[in-house]
Every structure is written in structure tokens, then in C-alpha cells.
Amino acid sequence: MFLELHIQEKKQFVLLLKEGRKSLDVLQWEDDNNLSCRLLSAIEKIIHRNDLDIASLRRLKILSDIPNRYTAVRIAKTIAAMFECRELHQLDKEDNKY
């Protein structure tokens, strides 16, 4: 399973919980210039609503209709990078390299 965030023009955000191509859950909101808190809260809400834990999510995929220079895109990509770091950290722990 993974999360997919669509950043749309006019400050619209759609967060999907997906298994392959199938959407299992969705949250939508308008930007209130607080994406870092809103996105983390939305991720937590989807996790709890679907009886999951963070370890069951492989990644956060970002799809954006706005330019990469916008702060919202940079924040989303930073949070997505945390998922990648978590995966690398888990691999290191499994290999006793950490």
C-alpha cells in the first residue's frame, strides 16, 4: 500500500490510500497555508481510519499541477522523502548495519 498526494491548482489537495491502481480511501482539503501540519494530520487520519500502521505504507507519491518552486510542492516532497528515509533505516536495522 502507498499514499498518493495530488496537488491541484487553486490550492486543492487530494490524498489517496492506494493498493496498486485501486484507491482504498481519499481525503480532500483546500490549502490554508499550513500544509506541513495538514498533510501529516491527513496521513495519520488515513492510517487510523483504515486500521493500518505507518510501516504498512511503502511510500508517498506526489503528483502536482503546480510548479516545483511552490512551497507546497517542496513541503510535500520533503514529507515523501521521510518515507524513503524510513525505508532505508528499516533495511539498515534488518541487516544489523544501524
Image: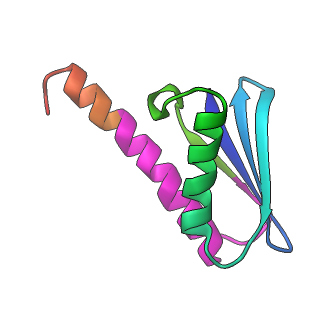
The overriding secondary structure of the stretch rendered in magenta is: helix
80 above or below 48?
A: below
Does 76 appear in magenta? Answer: yes
The x and y percentages for residue 98 are 14, 33
Q: Residue at x 55, y 65 (%)?
A: 37
**Which quadrant of the structure image shows residue 23?**
top right
The x and y percentages for residue 66 are 76, 70
Q: Residue at x 66, y 79 (%)?
A: 33
9 above or below 7?
A: below
Residue 55 seen anywhere in this rendered image of the structure: yes
- Which stretch did the figure color magenta? 63-87
Number of dots carrying numbers: 0
**Which quadrant of the structure image shows residue 76?**
bottom right
Q: Residue at x 30, y 30 (%)?
A: 90
Q: Residue at x 13, y 28 (%)?
A: 97
Q: Is residue 70 left or right of residue 81?
A: right
66 above or below 64?
A: below
The x and y percentages for residue 46 are 65, 40
Q: Is residue 9 left or right of residue 49?
A: right
The colour scheme used here is rainbow
Give the quadrant of the N terminus: top right
Q: Is residue 10 left or right of residue 34?
A: right
Q: Looking at the image, which is closer to me, 28 or 71?
A: 28
Does 59 appear in magenta? Answer: no
Q: Looking at the image, which is closer to me, 12 or 27?
A: 27
